[in-house]
Image (cartoon, rainbow, N blue to C red):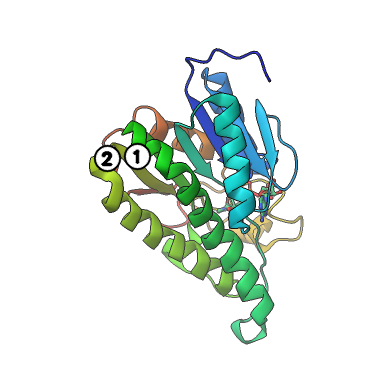
Amino acid sequence: MPDLNDAAPVALVTGAASGIGAACAALFRERGWRTAGLDLRTSDTDVPVQADVSDAAAVAAAIAQVQEQLGRIDFVVTAAGYYEEGIDVVDITRHQWDRMLAVIVGGTVNVARAVLPGMLERQSGGIVAISSELALGGSATDLHYVAAKGAVLGFIKSLALEVARSGVRVNAVAPGPTDTPLLLADSIWREPEYLATLPLGRLVTPQEIAGAVFYLASEGSQYCGEVISPNAGAVI
Ligand SMILES: NC(=O)c1ccc[n+]([C@@H]2O[C@H](COP(=O)([O-])OP(=O)(O)OC[C@H]3O[C@@H](n4cnc5c(N)ncnc54)[C@H](O)[C@@H]3O)[C@@H](O)[C@H]2O)c1
């Protein structure tokens, strides 16, 4: 077990092995939090656990392990996810729909269900789900991803209402195109012609997304069921 100050709050980050999740875990650690990472792969966190977020039993077991090792979970960031672009809606297969919804929506629900009992018992805690700016502005040729990210917003807003009076704050961050491995080298979101249409003219960095998440975890105590979208002006 890592040698950690057990008075420090605990952040659990899904998708912590890469990109936005890794940047979130690094920022929470830099600010003195203890960190746990839940990912298919190992992560640079105090307690890395490996599980597929779409597998409710595996998520419950992984989160129980984190709670056992770190004592509690104060804040959760659900950043595990993947992306598929360039598919017209009629060409998205049933398997692609099922898998996308299972990971993006199911994964968010599985993690929330596993951490909420401890938070409700302590009457404090917070969850930030990573959605996408595409759920706000719409997007063609990736409808299963966008639909899943939109469903996450409905879930988060409703969960926020359900638990707010219990001292648990639930919000979402909806990033615009962000410079992580999720955007392949030939992604349309990396093309200079697309970047030129953005008011800021560039991709967002994963550290900038982590900053918005950490704000919601620390100073942003007035936010409940909110969607903060750092997106370089893609949706204004
Ligand atoms: N990069 C962007 O442009 C962008 C924009 C908007 C939203 N997002 C969202 O942000 C989140 C993080 O994306 P990223 O850009 O950091 O991508 P990334 O590929 O760098 O990281 C995603 C991480 O999630 C993990 N993961 C994937 N499927 C998993 C599963 N079933 N169970 C457990 N872990 C799983 C991967 O192993 C990986 O470590 C995703 O939900 C993504 O949809 C990304």
Give the x, y percent position of residue 218. Answer: 39, 27
Residue at the (55%, 36%) spot, across then down: 12
Q: Considering only vertical position in the picture, is 107 above or below 23?
A: below
Q: Nearer the viewer, residue 128 or 141?
A: 128
Label 1: element kind? helix
Which sits in the foreground, 203 or 123? 123
Residue 59 image point, x, y percent? 60, 49
Q: Quadrant of residue 43?
A: top right
Name, please, the residue furthest toward the bottom.
90
Examine the rendering and report whether any part of residue 160 can be seen: yes
Q: Residue at x 52, y 15 (%)?
A: 6
Q: Is residue 17 left or right of residue 10?
A: right
Mark 2 neighbour density, 10 Å: few (under 14) some (14–19) many (20 or more): some
User: Which residue is under mark 2?
Assistant: 166
| Mark 2 or 1, nearer chain start | 1
Q: Are marks 2 and 1 in contact (CB under 8 Å)?
A: yes
Q: Quadrant of residue 13?
A: top right
| Residue sitting nearer the eye, 142 or 103 | 103
Residue under the image location 52 percent in, 66 percent down: 148
Give the x, y percent position of residue 69.
60, 26
179 sits left or right of 165 in the view: right
User: Which corner quadrant holds the C terminus?
Assistant: bottom left
Residue 4: mark: none
Q: Residue at x 27, y 44 (%)?
A: 164
Residue identifier under label 1: 120
Q: Is residue 210 depicted above or below 147 in this figure?
A: above
